Image (spheres, helix red, strand yellow):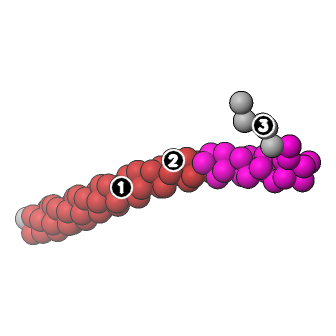
């Protein structure tokens, strides 16, 4: 049976610190992955909102133009007669 190697306290501390650091880095990597995924989803939602707002602005502009034309026609026929 092989004999166990006795390690010093310093060596043991260095080993445990390395294990804790690698675990911490793995947790941080998972968090960053989740954050990047959430940011990408937000970007796509923002792009979609921008297109919706642009469509809404176009519809409002069209309604304003049609209302203006209706006002002009109504005024023309009302004061003409």
Give left or right: position of 4 versus 65.
right
Q: Please, which residue is most extreme toward the right here?
A: 9
Q: Point out which mark residue 54 bears.
A: none
Which residue corresponds to mark 3?
3
Number of the front mark, 3 or 2: 3
Q: Which residues are magenta?
A: 6-27
Magenta segment includes 79: no
The residue depicted at 42 percent of the width and 55 percent of the height is: 40
Q: Secondary structure at mark 2?
A: helix
* Lower sequence index among marks 2 and 1: 2
C-alpha distance separating marks 3 and 1: 60 Å
In the rendered structure, the answer to whether residue 63 lies left or right of residue 23 reads left
Q: Main secondary structure of the magenta part?
A: helix
Dot 1, how many residues are within 10 Å of its Cα: few (below 14), some (14-19), or many (20+)? few
Q: Secondary structure at mark 3?
A: loop
Assign a secondary structure to mark 1. helix
Please give the name of the residue rendered at 60% of the width and 48% of the height, measured from the top-left corner. 26
**Residue 64 locus on image (x, y percent):** 25, 63
Residue under the point 71% across and 30% down: 1
Front-lying residue, 34 or 81: 34
Q: Which residue is mark 2?
A: 34
Q: Earlier in the sequence, mark 3 or mark 1?
A: 3
Q: Which residue is mark 1?
A: 44
Image location (x, y in percent) of residue 43: 41, 58
Tell me the quarter of the picture where residue 3 sits: top right
State the residue in front, 9 or 6.
6
């Amino acid at each position: 049976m092989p004999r166990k190697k006795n390690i010093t306290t310093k060596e043991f501390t260095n080993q445990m610190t390395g294990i804790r650091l690698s675990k911490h880095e793995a947790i941080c990597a998972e968090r960053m992955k989740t954050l990047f995924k959430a940011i990408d989803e937000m970007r796509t939602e923002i792009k979609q909102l921008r297109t919706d707002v642009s469509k809404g602005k176009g519809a409002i502009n069209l309604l304003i133009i049609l209302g203006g034309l209706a006002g002009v026609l109504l005024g023309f026929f009302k004061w003409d007669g």
